[in-house]
Amino acid sequence: MHSLCTAVSFGSALPAEKESTMKSTKVLTGACIMLSTAFATLPQGSPPADTSAAATFAGGCFWCMESPFAHLNGVIKVLPGYTGGKTVNPTYEQVCSGKTGHLEAVQVTYDPRKITYRELLDVFWRNINPTDAGGQFADRGIQYHTAIFYHTPEQKAEATASRDALEKSGKFEDVIVTAIRPAVVFYPAEDYHREYYLKNAEHYKQYREGSGRGPYLRRLWEHDDTTLHSSTTSSLSKIKFTYQRPGDDQLKKSLTKMQYNVAVCSATEPPFDNAYWNNHRDGIYVDILTGEPLFSSKDKFNSGTGWPSFTRPIDSISVVEKKDTSHGMQRIEVRSKNGDAHLGHLFPDGPAPTGMRYCINSASLKFVPKEDLEKEGYGKYLSIFR
């Protein structure tokens, strides 16, 4: 996975703090072990308390499997970890050796009233190569094998039906090798792995692309939204993401004229005369149409252009880049993934570490100060400022 576990290099080293953290995780107190084991164990057939349920998926590098589920409406928590082996409370280094029998996996806690297990299965299949028997993409070894760990007989039946339907669809030339196994003890990964796509967004993006996962998934699924289970021919787009674009009538009522013209009609606001070009407060910038988190003040810089400028988005999955030939120019337009709001343009003249400048219209954004993140429902993004 990462440069520690594979000889493949993607041109960027793991953060220095990761190496020191990995050394420290070797020493665990008895109390921590007991807590980890207690938290990790989800008996087969018994979902967590209240109305939530658990789903466990192994799809290779767990960095790349956390983000796809985290954005789904009805998903409560996504936790990376290790499962399927015999070593008790394994460390990342031990799992990377391939000798523990554990697979890197994610455990998804979700509300079945808002999202179904079948819909989670659809998301799982669309983020892996189920025909790879040796690992996933650049990551090789047993620890990167794919598997669905079922918690109930119903989950086993749905997982099997989903896999069989995918096999019959003709989507893949090779045989699907993803295993369907009973859920066993799940050991949460070390803290530095959790929400890695947020804490180390640039390295995560480079890894996802450099490993081959990003290009492969785009090539396979970009223009295909059909579901993968046999009992329905409905569209994957029916899965409700947390951030959904309202209808046009509602947008005309809720947005100012400038916001509507920019975000919906792809206009451009005037420089130096907009809400956030000179904003220096800590916080995040979300899509004005959907509320989806897009950019962080940690990545904002003064470009001298009069528009808010960022070196990168919080999560590369949340934005879409499109070729723009309007006004006789060749540019790259930036739009929000779920809201399809016009955000601005991308230029290769930004500062380190990315060298990129996301030149964004204030009118397409809403700023949420750091002190209000928890109150506004963005508490998970506080980790960016720690």
Image (spheres, helix red, strand yellow):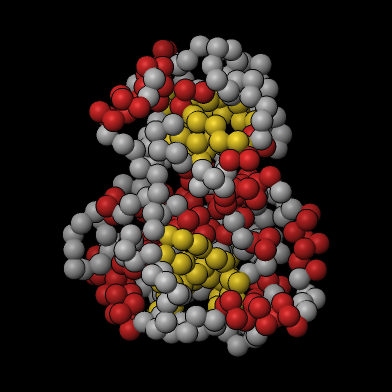
Residue occupying the point 37% across, 24% down: 255
Answer with left or right where residue 135 lies relative to residue 235: right
Q: Is residue 225 above or below residue 298?
A: below
Q: Count of labels shown? A: 0
Q: Position of residue 294 (x, y in %)?
A: 52, 38
Q: Position of residue 93 (x, y in %)?
A: 71, 73
Residue occupying the point 58% across, 76% down: 39
Q: Quadrant of the N terminus?
A: bottom right
Q: Position of residue 148 (x, y in %)?
A: 42, 75
Q: Position of residue 344 (x, y in %)?
A: 48, 25
* Residue 111 position by quadrant: bottom left
Q: Is residue 265 above or below residue 124?
A: above
Q: Is residue 181 visible?
A: no
Between residues 144 and 369, which one lies in front from this camera angle? 369
Answer with left or right where residue 119 lies relative to residue 62: left
Answer with left or right where residue 45 lies relative to residue 346: left
Considering every residue shown, the one lying at the far bottom of the view is 86
Q: Is residue 132 above or below residue 258?
A: below
